[in-house]
Image (tube, rainbow, N blue to C red):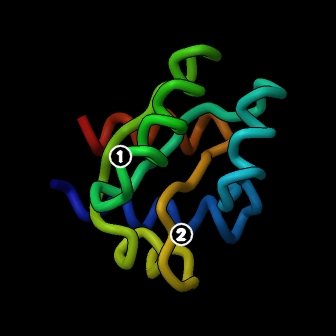
C-alpha cells in the first residue's frame, strides 16, 4: 500500500477538512458533507458494517487502509478507526494514491 496517503491525511486534518469519531462521521455522512471515508483494517466487524452500510446508503466512497494506530498517527492523535474526508480535492488525491 502506498504510504504517501498518510501525508495527505495529515494535511487534510491540519486544514480542518476531515473529521473523526463515530457519531461525528455518521452525522456528516447523513448531511452529505463527506467525500471519502478511510476505515482502519483492524476494526470490529460491527463497526465496519456500520460505516460501510452508511456509506453505501448515502453513496459515499470508502477505502480500507492501514491499522488504527497508523491512521491515528497520520493526524497526530491516538488510535483512530475511521477518518472522514470533507474536501473533494483531498478525497480525489487520496483515491488516486490508494487505488
Residue 82 vs 86, above or below: the answer is below
Q: Which type of secondary structure does the marked residue at label 2 adopt?
A: helix
Measured from the top left, where is residue 26 in percent x and y? Answer: 71, 40
Which residue is identified by label 2?
Answer: 10
Horizontal side, residue 47 vs residue 24: left or right: left
Q: Is residue 1 or residue 8 the one in the foreground?
A: 1
Measured from the top left, where is residue 72 in percent x and y? Answer: 48, 75
Q: Residue at x 78, y 38 (%)?
A: 28
Residue 7 vs 69, above or below: the answer is above
Q: Is residue 54 or residue 9 the one in the foreground?
A: 54
Q: Which type of secondary structure does the marked residue at label 1 adopt?
A: helix
Which residue is identified by label 1?
Answer: 45
Horizontal side, residue 72 vs residue 89: left or right: left
- For label 1, count other residues whose C-alpha is less than 10 Å away and answer few (under 14), some (14-19) or many (20+): few
Residue 11 vs 22, above or below: the answer is below
- For label 2, count other residues whose C-alpha is less than 10 Å away and answer few (under 14), some (14-19) or many (20+): some
Measured from the top left, where is residue 47 in percent x and y? Answer: 48, 48
Q: Residue at x 33, y 35 (%)?
A: 96
- Callout in the foreground (1, 2): 1
Quadrant for the C terminus in the image: top left
Quadrant for the N terminus in the image: bottom left
Earlier-in-chain disc, 1 versus 2: 2
Q: Is residue 53 or residue 40 the one in the foreground?
A: 53
Residue 2 vs 78, above or below: the answer is above
Measured from the top left, where is residue 20 in percent x and y? Answer: 66, 60
On residue 3, the disc is none
Count of number-bearing discs: 2
Residues at marks 1 and 2, CA–CA distance in whole angstroms: 26 Å
Q: Residue at x 53, y 37 (%)?
A: 50
Q: Is residue 65 or residue 1 the one in the foreground?
A: 65
Q: Residue at x 53, y 85 (%)?
A: 78
Amino acid at each position: 500500500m502506498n504510504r504517501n496517503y498518510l501525508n495527505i491525511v495529515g494535511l487534510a486534518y491540519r486544514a480542518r477538512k476531515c473529521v473523526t469519531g463515530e457519531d461525528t462521521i455518521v452525522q456528516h455522512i447523513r448531511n452529505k458533507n463527506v467525500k471519502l471515508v478511510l476505515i482502519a483494517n483492524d476494526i470490529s466487524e460491527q463497526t465496519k458494517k456500520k460505516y460501510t452500510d452508511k456509506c453505501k446508503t448515502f453513496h459515499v466512497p470508502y477505502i480500507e487502509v492501514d491499522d488504527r494506530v497508523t491512521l491515528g498517527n497520520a493526524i497526530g492523535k491516538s488510535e483512530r478507526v475511521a477518518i472522514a474526508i470533507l474536501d473533494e480535492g483531498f478525497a480525489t488525491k487520496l483515491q488516486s494514491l490508494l487505488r
